[in-house]
Each structure stands twice: as structure tokens, then as C-alpha cells.
Image (cartoon, rainbow, N blue to C red):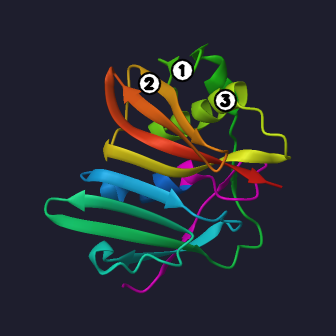
Amino acid sequence: MSEPAILELPYLGERNYIQGATLFEALAGDCRNGRNISMRISRLIESNRVAREDFDPEKGDSMGFYATLLWNEGELKKGIGINPAAPSPIPSRTPYDEAVIVSRATFHGATVSTTYQGNNSVVRTIVALNKALLIRLLSPTAPGQWLFVRLDLNRYVELFRELRIVHRASVGLAAVSSTIEIDGKTVGSLVFSWWKK
């Protein structure tokens, strides 16, 4: 493992945790040329500063991280682990209005699609639309919120003409999966979990 590097990330809107899309965007430069990209978030990161550590997935030393990013680069498997660090006293915030993304989308049954990307990353758009889709399809009885816990992409995607998300399966509310299609091709999947408050 490498020595941890500290990254300072913005909170989105009024959130007091790092959204998964923000974390992915911060690490995307490392896996831009990779294949079989997989991000997993096992615990909520309630700090705007995180410790980033490179590790070897082949050695199975990814346990204990709050989040991991794995990918293949040629014959190599690479990994980054993330843990929270001490927060800065005055965290930065980025304006974020999910409603704008959602308002430009079309919902039909278990599917949501859009041709609008605006200034948003592909992953931020995916997360916003999948959350809106699950709110329409599922009705948890306990107070809580939908959080993105896993993203799998067969390749890095920066732009789209059309994005389509299809709700696929649910294992209770702990693992609710959807398929991601971009420009008519399946490029991956994501999993959300209902985190009780």
C-alpha cells in the first residue's frame, strides 16, 4: 500500500456527507483508461476530507476502507481505498439541484431516460435519475434515504447522447440494482441501498 494522500472535496448543496458521484469524479482521472471499473461505498463518509490510498487488489487488502475504486488497466488490476480524514473547519459547498436533472428526464414504468447532460458528469446524472426512479417505484416504511453504494462500468464514459436506467432487481431495500445504458448499449450497473435514519 502507498502512503495516504489527503483530498478535500466539496459537499453538494446542503449535504453533510460526500456523495458517491463526487468521490468518483475526484478519482476518475486514475481509471479514465481502465476497464471493468467498480466503485463500492460501504459506509457514509461524513467528512469533506478523505485519505486516499493506492492498494493492490490481487493481495486482497481492500478490507476496512469506507470506499474502494477498482479497475483493470491492461493486464494489471489497480485499486484505490478511501477513508474519512479530519474535516476542514469550513467545508466548501457546490450548488446542486437534482430537480433540474430529474425534470428533463422521461419516466416509463421501471425505466428513466434523458438526453440532457448539461454541466453534470455522467455519474452524477446516473445517481440523480436512479434515485428519482426508486422513489417512484419503491416505498420504504422506515425513515431514511436512498444512497448509491456500488457502481460497475465496463469502461469510463464522459459524455452521452441518451442515458437510460432500468430498475432490475431488489434484495429487500439493502441492494436495489439497475442497469445503465448509454447510446443504446449497456455499459454497467449500479446498486442503491435504503439507509435508515
Query: What amino acid is found at the position of numbered circle 2 in the picture?
Result: Leu
98 or 88, nearer to the observer = 98
Q: Relative to residue 32, is residue 164 drawn left or right?
A: right
Indicate whether 125 appears above or below 82.
above
2 to 131, vertically: above or below: below
- The alpha-carbon separation of the residues under discs 1 and 2 comes to 11 Å
Which element carries disc 1, helix, strand or loop?
strand
Per the image, the residue denoted by label 1 is 111
**Residue drawn where x is 70% and y is 74% of the image:** 87
Marks 3 and 2, Cα distance to the nearest angstrom? 14 Å
Label 3 – label 1 distance at C-alpha:
11 Å
Q: Relative to 183, is 24 on the left or the right?
A: right
- The picture places residue 70, in percent across and down from the top left corner, at 36, 62
Q: Position of residue 181 (x, y in %)?
A: 39, 28
Above or below for 102 versus 93 = above
Residue 17 within the magenta-colored segment of the rendering:
yes
- Disc 2 target residue: 163
Q: Position of residue 3 (x, y in %)?
A: 42, 86
The residue sitting at 53% across, 78% down in the picture is 64
Q: Is residue 83 among what the camera can see? A: yes
Mark 3 or mark 1, earlier in chain? 1
Count residues near mark 3 (Cα–Cα under 10 Å), then give few for <14, some for 14-19, many for 20+: some
Residue 173: x and y in percent read 67, 45
The front one of 47 and 168 is 168
Q: Which mark is residue 132?
A: 3
The amino acid pointed to by label 3 is Ala
- Residue type beneath disc 1: Thr
User: For mark 2, does the 10 Å Cα neighbourhood hold few (<14), some (14 to 19), or many (20 or more) residues?
Assistant: many
Q: Measuring 51% from the left and 19% from the top, which residue is drawn there?
A: 113
Residue 108 shown in magenta: no
